[in-house]
Image: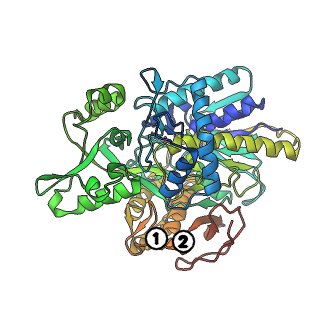
Amino acid sequence: MERPIIIGAGLAGLSAALSCARAGQACVLVSAQPSERSQSVMAEGGINAALDLMGEHDSVEQHAADTLRGGVDLADPEAVAALAAGAPDVVRDLIGLGVPFHCEGGRMVQRYFGGQKKARTAYAQSSTGKVLVTALVDAVRRFEAQGLVTRLPHHELAALVQEAPGAAVRGVRVRDAYTGRITQLGGPVLLCSGGFAGLFGAVTTGTTTNSGDATACALAAGADLANLEFVQYHPTTIAIADKRLLISEAARGEGGRLVTLRDGKPWYFMEERYPELGNLMPRDVVSREEAAVLARPDCGGAVYLDMRGLSAHAWRQRLADLRDECVHYLGIDPARELLPVEPGIHYCMGGVWVDRRHRTSLPGLWAAGECACQYHGANRLGGNSLLGAVFGGRVAAQDLLAAEAEAGALPASAVNVSDCDGPLALLPADAQANARLQEILRASLGILRDGPALRAATDELATLLPACASERQRRRVQLARAAVACALAREESRGAHWRQDFPDTRDEYLRTTVVRLEGDELELSWRAVGASAGACGETAAPANQVPACEEA
Ligand SMILES: Cc1cc2nc3c(=O)[nH]c(=O)nc-3n(C[C@H](O)[C@H](O)[C@H](O)COP(=O)(O)OP(=O)(O)OC[C@H]3O[C@@H](n4cnc5c(N)ncnc54)[C@H](O)[C@@H]3O)c2cc1C
């Protein structure tokens, strides 16, 4: 079998590489940046698994039900059931790799996260992503020494190799970020390249280097993308130089409360409006409530996170890193002062369309982690993304190996190296186009959306296309067009997609939004939740018509 090529070395890519290596299959792990610089490292709050360590009778079924409810019925129930069932084993495996999950009194403990009634989130202080990546890098290095993993950091995906757009994927062309040299590698490809929140520019809590370039390559190759309209705004972020600092949901899980000063008096608006889950409602709900409060003239345009009531034990044992971060970057000690917060772009629920085995619509191409559309539906619950990345990377790698073994050994393609095609810096015309692209996306894909803004964005993005100097920038604009097209077509409000002109959730939109590139034109269709590619809705769908779908 040709060596599988994994694009991206965050948690999904590391997990996939580990699965290949454990099965005795050599693989190549290509990434724009080394694992230690991936966005996975930034994860703070934790990873979900129904381990029921807190004596609350938590269960796999409850985890699945919370995930589906949080995703407002748009996640595939079978895929979510598998995710929830696999979660305890994922966490046990991580423990076996040496992850020091938080313990108290000699016992591992779990915490509350948004949208979940049970304390289900395993964590390592406020640095869960860092310790997970460290453990997986270490595990992968052992296999690297045995020749089972070849790492190619500082290499960007330049293109998927295929005979024509829409045809099977046979390999990749990757570009050395420092020399510009292009290398072609043959083999089945697994995309683990993260989300596209960086496409919005420096208003994301994550890394702006996750600007969806690999997802844009998949779009250009004719792969289906799905649910791109669902962009998650996290309710507690703070603007700092060139990005937004995340205040983890763990802060509210440990007792932090959202408050505003209404006519000068404290108003804990989430607790008043949602007595059951209060500050721990799913993120889409909290962000919308916050946006509404921020717009009120009697609230002074400010929302705060009040953590002054947390115990010294909670600060010392569970949130020490978070407190240090606030003191260091903001000069605010949250144990004593209110933290001013507002919603910020955080996560992409949509991405490359995949089925339950993480196969994309193109033979030879798989996708997992935040770049794929699986598990989260219209809104992701905190703690489910790290899980989705580790679990999804594993499922995808296992399916890839099984599929390739079944297909039989193909002749290994020669690796050839072409001439250097120049450095990666954005050309001046592209830098301008990119800046405009970011403005358009921020204006149209906010917490609250409407038809006129989305139509204006559609027109502006179309005129931006000819202004792009490089293929990479053209692809970015195409990806942005695809996201806006999905948002315009979904004439309802669901999860993270809230249309002021269509404020109701409508049954006829209980469908996956699918978008594909045909030449330069986008083709939009609807697919039944959980259906396989081509099951239905392959005709173009005008914004106001939802074609009937066969059920999965
Ligand atoms: C501040 C913050 C806190 C978070 N906290 C939590 C949390 O507590 N719990 C939780 O569940 N989730 C959390 N998340 C979300 C979670 O961290 C991510 O969704 C998850 O880690 C994604 O993993 P991934 O492997 O899919 O992608 P990433 O970790 O983003 O890795 C992507 C990889 O792809 C590479 N890559 C990107 N583009 C290309 C390209 N064109 N060519 C080659 N390589 C490329 C990158 O270099 C990187 O190696 C948080 C996110 C942020 C930003």
Task: Kindly check if marks 1 and 2 are in contact, taking CB atoms under 8 A apart as contact.
Answer: yes
Q: CA distance from mark 1 to mark 2?
A: 8 Å
Question: Residue 111's quadrant in the figure?
Answer: top left
The verdict on label 1 being within 8 Å of ligand 1 is no
Report if residue 402 is visible in the image: yes
Q: Residues within 10 Å of mark 1 (few under 14, many from 20)?
A: some
Amino acid bearing label 1: Thr
Task: Give the residue at mark 1.
Answer: 505
Q: Residue at x 34, y 60 (%)?
A: 288
Q: Position of residue 236 (x, y in %)?
A: 33, 47
Q: Residue at x 56, y 78 (%)?
A: 542
The mark total stands at: 2
Dot 2 falls on a residue whose secondary structure is helix
Question: Is ligand 1 less than 8 Å from the beta carbon at label 2?
Answer: no
Give above or below for 341 relative to 287. above
Task: Specify whether 406 is left or right of 376.
Answer: right
- Location of the C terminus by quadrant is bottom right
**Mark 2 Cα within 10 Å, few/some/many (few <14, many 20+)?**
many
Residue depicted at x 25% and y 55%? 269
Instruction: Indicate the quadrant containing the N terminus: top left, top right, bottom left or bottom right.
Output: top right
Residue 301 falls left or right of residue 463: left
Q: Is residue 179 visible?
A: no
Q: Position of residue 478 (x, y in %)?
A: 55, 61
Camera-side residue: 510 or 274?
A: 274
Q: Secondary structure at mark 1?
A: loop
Q: Amino acid at mark 2?
A: Tyr
> Of the numbered discs in the image, which one, if any, rests on residue 115?
none
Q: Is residue 247 left or right of residue 88?
A: left
Which of 107/546 is in front? 107
Can you give x and y, in whole percent of width and height, for residue 31 in the image? Answer: 60, 37
- Residue 447: x percent and y percent? 38, 61
Q: In this figure, which residue is indicated by the disc labeled 2?
A: 509
